[in-house]
């Protein structure tokens, strides 16, 4: 091999090495992204934000079932045709009222209409439909009876619109009365067509 041929070989190797270096340098500028396969421009995917941003994926947390609180029963009034009124609370408030809350249930196995007598017989109350407007609180110690309160239109401050109840169905109800004196801690709740029950005021 003569000197001229050796120089040509050396130049060729240098040229090949330079070309290889350029190719590697250009491919390094493109990053790790792969070219799109369908000819569409590639979308930049933003990493999920650690602060709960729009792109963050929140891990699903198991939901714990909340324990059911036991409902206190102050008294039970038994009515006609399988109806039953359970009293759960009778609370005084700062306005001088007592609000009685409970559940009216049809314990029969078939639908029944609520007893009409529950609404009482006062014209101002009856004209507003079926209700518990006939309920009263009897303070035997003070020898006074307290009727369900009414608004300026004569509408009783109690659950209204009661009608036919399916067998086994129940509905929450309330009644509001003037408050007996603070010395009266127990009263008798009376409702037409139901047996009375003595309840404690809180």
Image: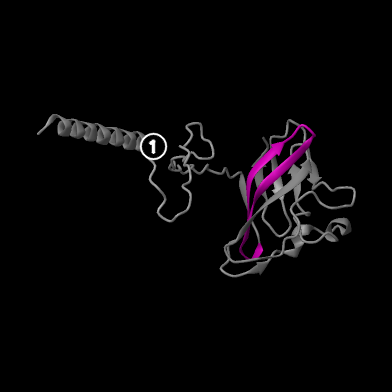
| Residue closer to the observer: 44 or 181 | 44
Image side of residue 5 versus residue 41, left or right: left
When asked about the image quadrant of residue 27, the answer is top left
Which SS does the magenta portion mostly show? strand
> What residue would you read off at disc 1?
31
Q: Residue at x 39, y 42 (%)?
A: 33
Q: Percent x, y for residue 80?
A: 66, 63
Query: Quadrant where the N terminus lies?
Result: top left
| Residue closer to the observer: 201 or 101 | 101
Which residue sits furthest left? Answer: 1
When asked about the image quadrant of residue 72, the answer is top right
When asked about the image quadrant of residue 105, the answer is bottom right
Q: Residues within 10 Å of mark 1 (few under 14, many from 20)?
A: few
Q: Residue at x 72, y 54 (%)?
A: 191
Q: Residue at x 82, y 46 (%)?
A: 149
Above-or-below relation of 79 to 32: below
Q: Percent x, y for residue 45?
A: 47, 42
Residue extent of the magenta highlight? 80-105
Q: Is residue 102 magenta?
A: yes
């Amino acid at each position: 091999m003569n000197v001229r041929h050796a120089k040509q070989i050396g130049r060729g190797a240098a040229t090949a090495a330079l070309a290889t270096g350029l190719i590697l340098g250009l491919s390094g500028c493109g990053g790790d992204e792969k070219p799109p396969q369908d000819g569409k421009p590639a979308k930049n995917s933003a990493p999920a934000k650690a602060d709960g941003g729009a792109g963050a994926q929140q891990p699903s947390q198991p939901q714990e079932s909340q324990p059911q609180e036991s409902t206190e029963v102050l008294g039970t009034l038994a009515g006609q045709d399988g109806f039953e009124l359970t009293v759960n609370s009778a609370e005084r408030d700062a306005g001088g009222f007592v609000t009685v809350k409970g559940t009216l249930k049809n314990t029969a196995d078939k639908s029944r209409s609520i007893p009409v007598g529950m609404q009482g017989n006062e014209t101002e109350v009856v004209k507003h439909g079926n209700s518990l407007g006939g309920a009263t609180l009897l303070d035997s110690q003070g020898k006074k009876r307290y009727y369900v309160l009414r608004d300026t239109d004569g509408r009783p401050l109690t659950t209204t619109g009661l009608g036919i109840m399916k067998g086994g169905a129940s509905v929450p109800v309330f009644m509001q009365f003037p408050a007996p004196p603070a010395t009266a801690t127990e009263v008798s709740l009376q409702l037409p067509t139901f047996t009375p029950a003595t309840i404690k005021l809180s």
